[in-house]
Image: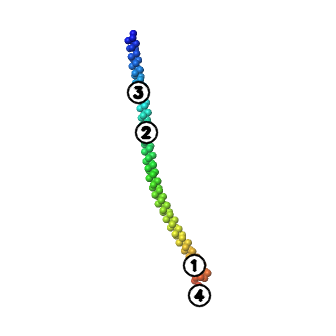
Amino acid sequence: MMSMENDSNKPSDNDQQKEKMQNLRNQVDSVKAVMVDNVERILERGERLDNIERRSEQLNATSANFKFTARKVQRKFCMLNAKWTVILSIVILIVFVVLLLLILHWTGVIGKRNND
């Protein structure tokens, strides 16, 4: 009778072994799926970081170009401002000289002939 009990236990032990193996496979598959997901996320993050790095390099280059252009425009308008300041100063000087000559002429300081 003992041998029958052992025989009936053997398939049961075998079934338990299969069940344990299946549980282990399921756990391995689950861990594998999580790891694959993690690797995909890391790759996506790396791509995003590369994209951000590329955009920051472009922004840096663009800002350097903007700075150069801004200085160039600033110099241009500074020279234009200086040019108009000189022109306006000359016009004011000419008007002042003409007014001075007119006043001197009207007051008789210049333009009168002395017959004495």
Distance between mark 3 and mark 2 Cα atoms: 25 Å
Is label 2 in contact with label 1 (beta carbons under 8 Å)? Answer: no
Residue at the extreme top: 1
Is label 3 in contact with label 2 (beta carbons under 8 Å)? Answer: no
Color style of the picture: rainbow
Q: Earlier in the sequence, mark 1 or mark 4?
A: 1
* Quadrant into which the C terminus falls: bottom right
Distance between mark 1 and mark 4 Cα atoms: 18 Å
Judged from the image, the secondary structure of the residue bearing numbered disc 1 is: helix
Distance between mark 3 and mark 1 Cα atoms: 112 Å
Q: Which residue is mark 1?
A: 101
Give the residue type that dot 3 points to: Arg
Distance between mark 4 and mark 2 Cα atoms: 105 Å
Q: Which residue is mark 4?
A: 114
Residue at the extreme bottom: 116
Give the residue type that dot 1 points to: Leu
Query: At 48% from the left edge and 58% from the top edge, which residue is drawn?
Result: 70
Return the x and y of residue 90 as percentages of the image width and height: 53, 72
